[in-house]
Image (tube, rainbow, N blue to C red):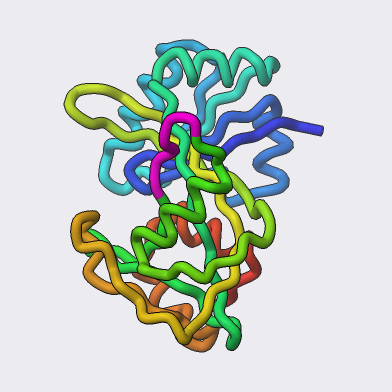
Amino acid sequence: MIFFRKIYYNDKPLVLTTDHEAYLEAYPVAEMYQYFSGATPRSFLQALQVMDRPGSPGAIIEDISETALIDQLQAMYQPIQAGGGLVFNEQGALLMIFRRGKWDLPKGKLDDGEDIAECALREVSEETGLHRLTLRAHLCDSYHIYSQDGDQYLKQTVWYTMSGSSEEKLRPQKEENILEARWVAEKEMSLFAGRAYEAIREVLKTAGCKW
């Protein structure tokens, strides 16, 4: 079984894999991605430079060693862990938030000494105002690279499915630049997914959301 991990940068996928050809066979869209060989600092830097270019769809780095790919990634980018939730109400509508011009899912960074599932519940509650939340199951993890104050970070977000009540009043957290929180029915999903980050659309697809 081949290893691959998709990491987002500039809303574009950087794919790490142990078998480039097998990945392309499974995901033909990646044929347009720029290919780099070897888990080296040079490969990572060049891949991100390519992804900085307008119109660049993504990049792939291949190495026969999964360990080498992960070790090099963690050596270059400071890891941050976060938790988030896909909250569904009694009617099956999904809770989404509007922040910085995009529709998003509630999530946030792990506090010291906190369990990641507790983090996900806390962040959903803080960002949306919901308190009657029930944790269901771990859904998936997403990854993205970003810069802040001159430092480079690799953020892993652990996503959980949750249940919430539409009877509770939604209170978007203004301090986190959240302008709106709302329940989105499946028939409306295309309007909201179209204005979401690519990583969020992938999480929505993993959850079985259709648009």
Q: Residue at x 52, y 71 (%)?
A: 132
Asked if residue 73 is positioned above or below residue 11 in the image, the reply reads: above
Query: How many discs appear?
Result: 0
Q: Position of residue 35 (x, y in %)?
A: 51, 29
- Is residue 32 something one can see in this rendering? no
Q: Residue at x 34, y 32 (%)?
A: 50
- Image quadrant where one finds the N terminus: top right
Q: Could you tell whether 15 is left or right of 181 in the image?
A: right
Residue 78 appears in view = yes
**Magenta segment, principal secondary structure?**
loop
Rendered location of residue 189, percent (x, y): 47, 79
Residue sitting at 69 percent across and 17 percent down? 64
**Which residue is rendered at x = 48% and y = 18% of the image?**
74
Q: In the image, is residue 37 part of the stretch drawn in magenta?
A: no
Can you give x and y, in whole percent of width and height, for residue 49 in the image? 31, 28
The spot of residue 199 in percent (x, y) is 46, 52
User: Is 151 rendered above or below residue 42?
Assistant: below
Establish if 198 lies above or below 155: below
Q: Which residues are magenta?
A: 108-113
**Along the viewing direction, whichever of 105 and 15 lies nearer the viewer:** 105
Q: Is residue 96 left or right of residue 10?
A: right
Q: For this view, does 98 lie left or right of residue 59?
A: left
Left or right, 192 with respect to 134, comes to left
Does residue 186 lie above or below 23 as drawn? below
In this view of the protein, which residue sits in the foreground, 4 or 184?
184
**Between 46 and 85, the one nearer to me in the picture:** 85
